[in-house]
Image: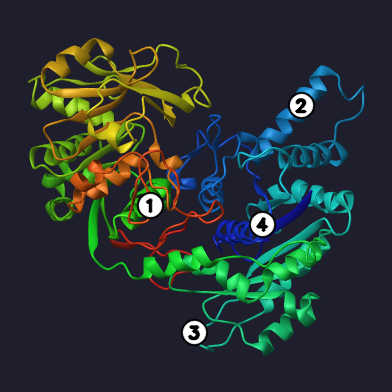
Amino acid sequence: MKYVLVTGGVVSGLGKGVTASSIGLLLQACDLRVTSIKIDPYLNTDAGTMSPFEHGEVFVLDDGGEVDLDLGNYERFLDIKLTRDNNITTGKIYQSVIDKERRGDYLGSTVQVVPHITDAIQDWIERVAAIPVDGKEGPPDVCVIELGGTIGDIESMPFIEALGQFSYRVGAGNFCLIHVSLVPVLNVVGEPKTKPTQHSVRGLRSLGLTPDILACRSTMELDMNVKEKLSRFCHVPLENIVSLYDVPDILHIPSLLRDQRAHEAILKALNLLSVVRQPNLKEWIAMAKRSDMLHEPVRVAMVGKYTGLSDSYLSVLKALLHASVACKRKLVINWVSASDLEDATAIESPDVNRAAWNSLKAADAVVVPGGFGDRGVEGKIIAAKYARENNIPYLGICLGMQIAVIEYARSVLGLKNANSTEFDPNTKIPCVIFMPEGSKTHMGGTMRLGSRRTYFHVTNCKSAQLYGNQSFIDERHRHRYEVNPDMVAQLEEAGLSFTGKDESGQRMEIVELQSHPYFVGVQFHPEFKSRPGKPSAVFLGLIAAASGQLDALLKKSVGAKANGYAIGKGVSGLPQHHRYGNMGVNVTVGSFDGMYKKSNGLHV
């Protein structure tokens, strides 16, 4: 097994995740099998209870693991399926060591950071790196490890020590360290400054790790003088210093690495240079060119409660992007804070309310993503009602589906007090209820999590057609509330169709309004399995409906390709290593700066 470690210096948020994913792609393009591990030094055992405002979205894996959003980056880049153990946290490591100590595994020894914690980290990495994640038999060839945070952080110290020992443990030729560091360009001087990177590398070396490659993040391409200076002071060969400067789209990062022969430096450090082929990025580059040519916009209103931090909905944005590329449309996001649509805001801040409504009305489609808590719920109900009554394509995910059911009960059935027990525990008309097997005392890991099966109960519905008329599908879940099965018959009599249910037939998974151009709600999270070149079926349906292509899409036969993308059974029209799509997106309301982009944009 070969290992590539990616660390970060100077400041956080430099794009280690994008760099690690691009390195994995580059090695995969050399015909190597690649897996990934993300190390998060926080004490939480997983990301399940962390606020999206603080940490971005919680990415859910097939096995139910609630993990860091960077694992979503890895899965999308490399088209692999990771496990919960591919995300290592301080909490997981300490918990495993304490469990061993309680069992008496250490035979009376004093349990210490060195060697017990550091050994546990190394053993975990070795064990997880051998797990196949690409559907093939046998262990992968290379494991890319990303160490979260910044060199010098107190909480990272046990991992730094463990990784220093690990590099010695696996031996020369099996370990490559890539240090991602900031080389700022001061506006006053107008030239790159190397001192922050010098200090960062010095700190790294003082902790027992020496970088093989320097990946320098900067707003401009570094010239030879700057590279020579970095080489001299950081003790890194000149040819191993890579300039990761701002580019129009992060699709260019893998080719940027390739053009600077970063793969050769990595392969040389891993003793693989003579046994693998040159990276084949033809499909990737072709995809980048196609994405650059998209001009006709499709505008989607994202109505949520975490709109202040776009990373809270990263996978939803990616899924929309994949679908937009498949429909040859340029995605434009209108961020709408759900609470801004409510009557209380109209009274307190009429200008804010007016702006939110203008953004909603300007959209070609409406998405209400998942969420927790009652803040902004009434605004989401308003958005669902607006989309339903005005024939605007609508997709509700998890809470967004529950919202659609509540709105329908209130507006069509006339049940004005219909609600979810999540928002009103004493509601007399509970459209949405707490799952019987859920825990009301423990929050972490107690939801309905991971890949679950959904069976179609209506064969001629839009969702079944979009999924290729399969009898069932497997999608990832993350929820603790569900549609009240006692109200299903009443809702269906009024025209709301529950087209997908679980194996028991009591859990509602997909809801549709057949008389609407496209009004779909799903209890699961389809965004977690969407891939560039293999867009999620319900997201593809939404964008197709918003751009006038839905009828043509539904007429396609199972497995037929449209616009170069497979529809139906999800078979990619691209080679296995290169199932990618456009990663750029224009954001008009609540825009944010994306790493590696000069304009507004998103991570892959």
Of labels 4 and 1, earlier in sequence is 4
* Amino acid type assigned to the residue bearing label 4 in the image: Asp
Q: Position of residue 223 (x, y in %)?
A: 62, 87
Query: Which residue is tagged 4?
Result: 31
Task: Give above or below for 254 relative to 139.
Answer: below
Task: Give above or below for 60 relative to 237.
Answer: above
Q: Secondary structure at mark 1?
A: strand
Q: Is residue 82 left or right of residue 443?
A: right
Query: Which residue is tagged 2?
Result: 98
At 43% from the left and 24% from the top, the residue drawn is 453
Of labels 3 and 2, earlier in sequence is 2
Which of discs 4 and 3 lies nearer the camera? The answer is: 4
| Residue 77 in view | yes
| Residue 182 in view | no
Residue with the most extreme right position: 108
For label 4, count other residues whose C-alpha is less than 10 Å away and answer few (under 14), some (14-19) or many (20+): some
Q: Secondary structure at mark 4?
A: loop
Alpha carbon distance from label 3 to label 1:
44 Å
Of labels 3 and 1, earlier in sequence is 3
At 22% from the left and 38% from the top, the residue drawn is 380
Q: Which mark is residue 187?
A: 3
Alpha carbon distance from label 4 to label 3:
42 Å
Which of discs 3 and 1 lies nearer the camera? The answer is: 1
Q: CB under 8 Å between callouts 4 and 1?
A: no
Query: Which residue is tagged 1?
Result: 565
* Amino acid type assigned to the residue bearing label 1 in the image: Tyr
Of labels 4 and 3, earlier in sequence is 4
Q: CB under 8 Å between callouts 1 and 2?
A: no
In front of the other: 231 or 394: 394
Q: Secondary structure at mark 2?
A: helix
At 51% from the left and 77% from the top, the residue drawn is 219
